[in-house]
Image: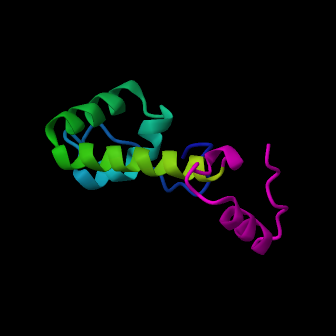
Amino acid sequence: MRDDDPEGRRRDMTAATIELSCREVSDFLGAYLDGDLRPDERARFDEHLAECPDCRTYLRQYEATIGLAKDACEDDEAIGAGIPDSLVDAILSATGKAPRRRT
């Protein structure tokens, strides 16, 4: 069990597992992106990605989703230039936040 997985959900990739399945890649994706895999685990993960276009696509989509989620949590700068100020102010007001100050 790992310190960052107190419930023991993350299992180790054992040496008995020669090739990773797509399901295992999905299970370990967060650890892979966080750099938390041991070198031998990462090597097998990379080998699977090199051979599996579906998992490469899934990885790219996962990374894009994480990026969008981070962008959504940014301050007003993440709000697109094409969105009318009145719409942004209405949404902020409805959520109990103060309208943006215009510069």
- Left or right: residue 94 compared with residue 41: right
Residue 40 falls within the magenta-colored stretch? no
| Whether residue 7 is situated above or below residue 71 in the rendered picture | below
| Whether residue 31 is situated above or below residue 6 in the rendered picture | above
- Left or right: residue 75 compared with residue 31: right
What stretch of residues is rendered in magenta?
A: 74-103
- Left or right: residue 19 compared with residue 100: left
Residue 77 falls within the magenta-colored stretch? yes
Q: Outermost residue, top direction?
A: 39
- Left or right: residue 24 compared with residue 71: left
Q: Which residue is drawn at 79% across and 48% down?
A: 102
In this view, the residue in front, 2 or 47, is 47
> For residue 94, which quarter of the picture?
bottom right
| Whether residue 84 is situated above or below residue 5 in the rendered picture | below
Q: Residue at x 24, y 52 (%)?
A: 22
Give coordinates of residue 49: x percent, y percent.
Answer: 23, 38
